[in-house]
Image (cartoon, rainbow, N blue to C red):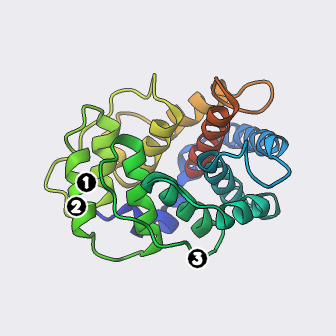
Amino acid sequence: MLKTLSTLFLLLLPLAGEELGVSMRLESAMVMERGCKALMAWQSPDGSWHGDLRATAHAATALSMAGQDSAASNGIAYISAGNAHSSVESALCSRALLHAGKTPKPQPEPVSEAGCDALFIMEAGFLAMPGAKPSTAQKTLRDRLLASQNPVIRLAACAMMEDTPFNAPRISTLNDLDYASLYWAARSLLVLPSSFTGNWRNAIVSKLLDGQKADGGWGEGAPPQRTCDTALALQTLILCL
């Protein structure tokens, strides 16, 4: 029987670095430090990132995961005082609060979310109630994700819930994934490593090392999206170390 991501989260992280060479792990640590500094430099005086709740939740989660609790604290305060306007915003805020050791607000049931947004909603629910059986709404959401054309989404849906009645799909390449999908590829392959041919940690870490920009961030586009991309790249890197 497959174990859920929520059950294996703390157990698997210490093992992740075993398949990375020493030089890659050292380079990754330096890359992670530059990424954290970039996030801290982009933070607004009110504790948010660009006044955007989604970007703030992703950034605060990344800094908490990196052990930068003091840097994350103002973002956590901003999240605690804010009001989410969608199920995914609520889930991302809950996820950030949980990583910071805080109690999240009750989450609304997912309605029509799809793709990575739906996965973040499921993840927040499992992190909030580790070991709990999936709700009917979570199972319905899972079934919708299993119909996705994206193999990473299907793999994550399989890895997330232990009673999934489908064989897990295989991922043949990690090229052309956005940073949210790359996070979910790493998260899922921690549970189902045989779903990728070769050393998936090396493949993901190499992609992240190559993708970091001169300012320490990742991604392109407007600041809120770059903050989300950078925060997700850092979260993914931490999963792999």
Give whichever of 168, 88 is nearer the camera: 88
In the displayed structure image, the side of residue 128 where residue 208 appears, left or right: right
Pick whichever of labels 3 and 2 is earlier in the sequence.
Answer: 3
Residue in view at x 34 percent, y 63 percent: 109
- Report if the CB atoms under discs 1 and 2 are less than 8 Å apart: yes
Label 3 residue SS = loop
Marks 3/2: CA–CA distance = 24 Å
Type of the residue with mark 3: Thr
Type of the residue with mark 1: Arg
Label 1 residue SS = helix
Return the residue at label 2.
Answer: 139
Instruction: Mark yes or no: residue 14 visible.
Output: no
Marks 1/2: CA–CA distance = 5 Å
Residue 103 tag number: 3
**Position of residue 203 measured from the top left corner of the image (x, y, whole percent):** 51, 32
In the displayed structure image, the side of residue 75 where residue 107 appears, left or right: left
